[in-house]
Structures are given as structure tokens and as C-alpha cells.
Amino acid sequence: MSYSNHNIELHTNMNYSHKKFKLKTRQNLFGWVCLIPAVILIAAMSFYPMFKALILSFRTGIGAKMTWAGFNNYIRMFQDNVFIQALKNNFIYLIIQVPIMLVLALILACMLNDRNLRFKGLFRTAIFLPCATSLVSYAIIFRSLFAIDGFINVMLMKLGILKTGYNFLAYPNSARAVIIIALIWRWTGYNMVFYLAGLQNIEYTIYEAAKIDGASPFQSFWKITVPLLKPIILLTAIMSTNGTLQLFDESVNLTNGGPANATITMSHYIYNMSFKYVPNFGYAAAMSYLILVLVAILAFLQMKVGDKRD
Amino acid sequence: MIEKGKRIFQYIFLTVVSIISVFPLYWMFCAATNKSVDVIRGKLIPGTALLDNLKNLLASQDVAGAMTNSFKYSITLTLISLCICSLAGYGFEIFHDKAKDTVMSILLLAMMVPFAATMIPLFQMFSKAGLLNSTIGFILPTISTPFLIMLFRQSARSFPHDIIEAARIDGLNEFQIFYRMFIPTMRSTYAAAMTITFMNAWNNYLWPKVIMTDDKSITMPMLVANLTEGYVTDYGMLMLGVLLCTIPTIIIFFVLQRSFAEGITGAVK
Amino acid sequence: MKKKFISLLVVASMALSMVACGSSTTTTESGGAAPATETKAESTSGANELTVWCWDPAFNIYAMQEAEKVYQKDHPDFKLNVVETPWQDLQTKLTTAATSGDLSTLPDIILMQDNAFQKNVMSFPDVFVDLTDSGIAFDKFGASKVAYSTVAGKHYGVPFDNGAVIQALRTDVLEQAGFTIEDFTDITWSEYIEKAKVVLEKTGKPLNSCVAGESDLIVMMLQSAGGSLFNEDGTPNIVNNEILHEVMKTYVELIKSGVLVHVNDWDQYVGSFTNGTVAGTINGCWILGSIQTAEDQKGLWQITNMPKLDNVSSATNYSNNGGSSWAITSNSKNKELAIDFLSKTFAGSVEFYETILPKSGALATYIPVGDSDVYGEPQEFFQGQAIYAMITDFASKVPSNNTGIYYYEARDAVATALSNVISGADLKAELETAESTVKFTMGQ
């Protein structure tokens, strides 16, 4: 018995090493084949138009009449007060909103991943709802909530925090705060979905072992959940950075960039430059490329920190 | 006792967050059942004008047509997109090497330019190809997205490599391993990706509004936009339109959420 | 085991190929649909058919459909295809098509916001058809209205709806403070503020509201004295614009005295008077539609003209806000038909305007209609005032204004200055910033 077993093993081994080289190449080839449809589509649908936009960013003119401008558009945006204000606003949103949102999403995902919790489905659906809620209704609601006679002011006055109504959307800092609150409200559930999905791939036994070893819930969250979810956290961090630097909806619909451009975002300004004002697509394209550079740098840094395979 | 206190806190916290999250939907529902002037006056209880609003909406807009279009575009896009992107994500992670990591980084650049900048060259391409007012025109630019590829790539990192080795010894070819091993194991990721892709496709607005020039091709978000234009807005009718535009995504989420949260549960106690 | 596995694979590949088939059927389906739309576009050019883009079912779409009926009386084969396209979308589609140099997607006729008319004609001169010698009688429209769609002396638009400014007031509230509508007719802003303060004191109600950060009221006041944000040569006219200085001062005073309140968006603006928290409004006459949604306020409203600026010799009580005009695109294969259609309806039929008025409240800028009996009918909601005849009269007295190509840029810059001035910044310095912002945008 043992002899025949040994024999088979030897046979397979020999066979294996014989084919090993061929197999490796074939596997590697398959790896590339997997990418082909996706890469071709992205090249045609994104990179080609991006290349066209890059050329456009070196041109200038009204509407369809464009002439060569060299780097003028790129120099111009740093002399453009509205654009610089927009750039600052985007970074304020990024620095404050993204960390709060991601931490909150992670906490909610962990809470909802509890198998002893009742009404999980309802809670999950409720918390996901904001990102499915149409912009039209949510903008109307947020504006009226923060109006001078709106719900928030009424509550603050009842609690004695404010004496008279405060017009949140009329002052730069409070208007920015409203945008940040709206963003957190809208996107926390969205990010939670990815964490929930990621948590399913963590073996429950790891937690039980940690518990037996005397780890507190906080410790197991910090030592097990966060490291194992790191790839997904990286993903959401990059996506949120990208989303915040390209923020458009809230600036247009909640504050219309006001008061006096205090909340306008780069994408909002680019849109105005393309479709509201006299169209200057060369300049709009140049500003778009600045966004690309900024996001790319931030994403690169995030990947340096978070995309190591152990 | 401490366990119980924590449990109660957990329920209270989740309930508060849920109420804050659901409130606009409740408001939308109330608004859809009230007359326009009551909506503007901030009435917060359901009214009796639902049927009138529905009648007005159906009379002024082709709701059935827009619904059908939206479903057709979104479902087609979601299915094709999931196949292509999950395969790519699998390829990137399971067979990862330096070259593929570089390709992934380059692909990520594709999402970093605001769409307003690439829209016009894209429109030129689609117009020349005769793809305006068509399903394929709607879906083609967003079938393959760096986001979805990266989602599958990141999720595949927790996919155990010994399963692959075992399957190879069992004689499965590479595609079989992807189909038979990877897809079932990553069910939760697929469910999450499906929800998000469907939602993004459903709510996509800027692109369809450029390529859909025929009123037979309009989508639900375009229909809602039709309702907001004009000198006098009928808010009751508008909110009914918005509600109808929101419900499908909610149903899809509710159905699929089980799939991405069942199984191994109980992460934090 | 192996067999089961193979059968599973077969099922799987079938499922996959179904997805693939699904996509290919949609391809063929859309491939089939594309030629269909093309033939449709061609039939538009061949037969008696026109395609129109406009956006309001209760208003301009309705008007177009009625115009179709009027025209069909003499041209039974005529067919009109109205595609509902919100203004924002229309502008996006127009810009995209014109910039990409592919005009084939454009319809025969588009409705254009008057404020955007000059900008679009100057940015995309190839898109629009010059109507100057088309035989359309432009002198039958109010001169200030025609000015919006006139670029370098050439006419590009057929005027449609009226944006003449009215002041609507709750006379029941005025009564409590001892005033009537006559006390607010033909007055100046300083008189207005004085009287409105009394109303505010006695009833607690401000007389006007507007959206913070928007420039509508500013521009209405400016135009009422014939002022513009641009000189004739197209250079911005902000810092040295005396009318604008007066406008800004008046506006700040309105806010400080509390008779004008700021709200955060359009919905709250409409809410402020339909709720009755504000007892009046000043806006383009199309606002009457929103006022009338509050059915319980029937008979409590009256309208009159707006106050005029103090210290400005050219000041009047009339202005304009909003409104739109029809333009014909160069893509149209049926330009002659489109011109004939518009000239026999929107630019030539009193009967047509009489038909559309009662249901839509669409007020013409076509002067011959002003004497029509339909326009003279008393309106119950406004205590029997013949508001339509009044508005037509107002419209004929509106001074022209020069929007210029950079109109939106200038409006936004001035609105920014205004927000800052209200929070305490220096008027002159802010106007200087506004002018340099506009100049910066104009320098490519």
C-alpha cells in the first residue's frame, strides 16, 4: 500500500515539475486575458477622451473657436481668485468630512454585522437609504432644515442654545458645515456597504479565539477588524478622496456656491465655465487636469501606506 | 448587565441613525400625497392628494416608458459590468505582479478627471458611431470602471490561495476556478457591487441627458428633471416622481442586503 | 462528481452567453433604433414636420401644441414634434453639439432663455439662423424684448413670453396698515421703504422676499432705469456705473430696514408668500402662476408696477425679468417652413395668443394683442383687475438693457459683491473686485 502511494506521489511530482514551466506561463497568460475586456473599454471610453481633453487644455477660445495657448490655461488658474477659493473649499471638505464619514461607516458596519442583532435588514436598509434618495428632495429638505425658521433653529432655540434664528447658509463657515453634514449623511451608508461585504470574509473563529485570549471588543476591532479590512478601507479612502475633490451636487444644489463663493467647488466652477458662462472648454479642461493631478498624488500616497501585501 | 446596557445603547444608536436617514424619504412620501401648496407650507403628515398627483403625473409624463428604459439600461449595464470588472479584479489580484499593479494604478487615473471635461470628445465618438438614443450608448462608457475593478481586486485579497492550488490539482482550468470557486466565495462582494452599480446606473444623469435627444429614450432622473422646470413647480407631483424614481433602488438594496451580510457574522460583540 | 461539475459548467457558460446575447440583442435593437431615428430626422426634413425643444408642459409646450393646431388649419399635413427638454439640459445639449461640431442632433426650433441668447449666438454663430430678412415683423414686439435676441443688429429670435416686472401685494395686509394698492403705485424706493416699514410695524409682515445670493432683484432695478452691466462696446460697466451704485445702496437699505427678507432657495421664496409670511413680491409677471397656487388667498391680491430708483434721471417703474424667445437652428432642413410657422403663429396671430392665455397665463410680447378683449377680462383672483392688459402695458414701457455676452459672469460677480456688502464690506472696493473678476473672465 505504502509503496504504491509513494509511487503515485513520485509520478505526480515528476509530471508536475515537467509541466511546471508551461503551467506558470499559461496561468500568467490567463491573468492578462482577464484584464483585456476591462482595459480595452477603459482605454476607449476614458483614456481616449482624456487625451483629447489634455490637448484641449492647451487651447483657448470661445465656444468652438479655439487657438493654441501653450501653458496659459495652467498659469491662469492660479491667478483666478474664484478657482483658488474653490480649491481651498474642496480641501476643507476633504480633510474634515472623509475621516469622520469613514470611521462612522466602519463603526456602523461592525454594529450591523452582529449576528445577535434583531431587525438588521431594516437598519441596514435605513442607513443605506440616503445615497439612494434623490438629490432633488434631499436638497429641498436640507435647505429648509437649516433655514432661519427651520427645524434646526427651532430646536436650538428651544434648547436655549440660540436666542434668535441663525441663518446657517448665509455665513461661510456654517454653510460649509452644512455641506459637510449633508455629505456625511449621504455617503456613510454607501461606504458601510463595502465594509459589510468585506466583513463577511473574516472568519468568525478569529474573534472567538481573541475573546478567549481576553481581548476587549475595542482591541479586537483595532487588532483584527481594521487590519483585515485594510484593502477595503484603502478602496473607500481613495474613492472618497476622488469624490470629494470632484464634489459637484452639494455645491450646486444646497448653497449654489454661496454666500459669495464661500462654498463653491472646483467641479462646480468647471461646470459653470462650460455650460453657464461663455463656454471656455480649454480652461475647463486645464482645471480638470489639476484635479487629476491632485487626486493622483493623494491616491498614490494612500496606496503607499495601505496597499502592502503581507 | 454591562452586556445588556451595551445592547440597549446599540439599539438606541442605530434607531437614531436610522430615523435621521429615513426622514427625507418619509418627507418625500408625505409630499407625494399632498397638494403642491401644502408641500411648500411644510406639511409633515400624509395627505389625500396622492391620486390627483398620480393622475397629473401620468397625464404629463410617460412614466411607464421612462421606467422601462431605466430598468433596461440599468440591468443590462449591471450584469455586463459585473462580469467584466470582477474578472479583471480577479486577474489583477490572483495573478498579481509588478506589471499588473502598475496597470491598475494607471487605470485608476481614468476616474480622476471630472466627466464634464471628457463628455464632449465622448459625445463626438458616440454621435459618429450612431449610438445616440440607444441602450448601448447609455451603458458603454460605464461598463468598465476603475472603481468596480478595484473593489474586486481589494476583496480578492482575502480569497485563500490554497483553494486555487487545490482546484488546480483537481484538474480545473483557470476559468473554471474563477467561475466555480471565486464567484460563490465572493458572493457578498458581488451583491454589494450589484447594488452600487445598479444605483449608479439608475441615477446617472449627465451622460443620458447629452445622448438622449429623443423623448422616447428618457430615463427616470430625466423625467424628474422635466418636472422641476417651468415657471410653476407642482411639488406634489414632483415628489411623487422622485419617490417612483427612488423606490427601485431601495427594493434592490433590501433584497440584496441579506446576501452581503449573512453567513459568517458577529464581528464585534 | 465530475459529470455534475461539467453540467454545472455548461449551465454557467450558457448563463454567460445569455448575458452576452442579451448585450448583443440590445446592440441590434439599438442598431435598429438608430436608423429609425435617422429616418425620422430625414422625414422631418422631407415632409411637413418640425421638431421643437422646449420645457414647460403648462406653458411653452402647451403654447407650441396650440400653435400647431392653428397652423394646421391652413396646412393640414403639418406635424410638430415637441420634445420636452428642461432648459439646463437644452443648454448642455446645445453646447455639446455645437462644440463638437456635430449639429445633426439639434432640432429645427429651440426655445432660448433671453438671458442666454447673446451668449449662445456669439459663442456658436454657426448654430443660429439670421431672421432679419425673413419677413417676420419684429416691430410688432416690445423693443426691449426684441433687444434680447438681437446680436450686432441682426435678429435671431422670435419673442415669446413676457417677463415684465410686476409688484404683487396682499391688499388685506396693506389695509391693516392703512394703505391701498394706490399707495404703492408709481412710487420711488424711498417712499416704498417708508410705507413698507409701517406695514412691517403694524402687521409684522415684510413686503418682499428674495433668494440670497441671486442677482435677480438687482438686475431688475438696474434695468428699470435703463442701466446695464456692460457698455455698448462690450466692456464691463460696474465700478463707474452710477445707477448700479444707487441700486446697491437701495438694496442694502431694503435688507437693513427688514422690509425685504432673504430666503435660501426658490422653494422657500415661493413658500414665503404662499404661506402668507411675506405680504408681497416683486418679480417677472410669470410669478403670478405661483401666487395663484394658494387658492385660499383668492381675492386678497392686487398687482401694480414696481418702485423706481431715487436720484436717477432715467428711472422708470418698469423692468423685465426672465422670458424666452424661439430660435431656428442651422441644422433645420426646413428653415422656410419653420420661419413660416413662427411668423403665422407666434409673430402673427392675435387669435393664437387669445387661445393660449386663459389656460396657461402665457402672456405675449406681441403688441397687437394688448387691445384684445381676452386680455381685458377682469381676473377674480386679483379682485377684478384686468391684469393681463396691465402687464402688456407695463411691458411696452420697459427700458432696453444690454445683456452682452458675459451676462451670467457679470451677474454672479455683482451678486458676490452684494453678499459681501450686506455683511459689511465696502461698496466701492467690492464693485472693483467684481469688475476685475469679470475682466479676468473675459481675458482668455
Image (cartoon, helix red, strand yellow):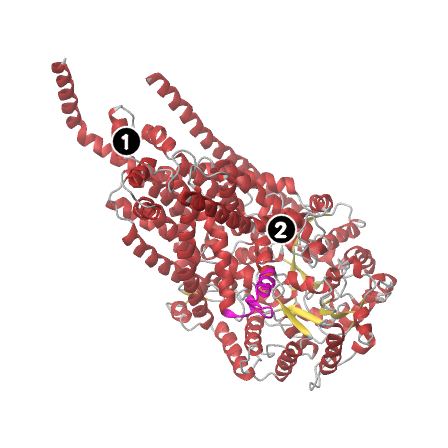
Q: Amino acid at mark 1?
A: Ile
Q: Position of residue C192 (x, y in %)?
A: 74, 79
Quick one: quadrant of the C terminus of chain A? top left
Under circle 2, the secondary element is: helix
A23 is higher (above) or lower (below) than C263: above
Q: Position of residue C252 (x, y in %)?
A: 62, 79
Q: Position of residue C184 (x, y in %)?
A: 78, 77
Range of magenta residues: A151-172
Residue placed most toward the observer, C280 or C53: C280
Judging by the rendered image, the residue that carries numbered circle 2 is B27
- Same-subunit check for callouts 2 and 1: yes
Q: Chain of mark 1?
A: B
Label 2 crowd (10 A; few <14 / some 14-19 / many >=20): many
Relative horizontal placement of residue A186, taking residue A145 as reference (left or right): left
Report, in whole angstroms, how far the alpha carbon at label 2 lies from the one at label 1.
Answer: 50 Å
Judging by the rendered image, the residue that carries numbered circle 1 is B164
What residue do we see at 66% from left, 49% from top?
Answer: B30
Residue B90: quarter of image: top left
Residue C302: quarter of image: bottom right
Relative horizontal placement of residue C92, taking residue B63 as reference (left or right): left
A31 is higher (above) or lower (below) than C314: above
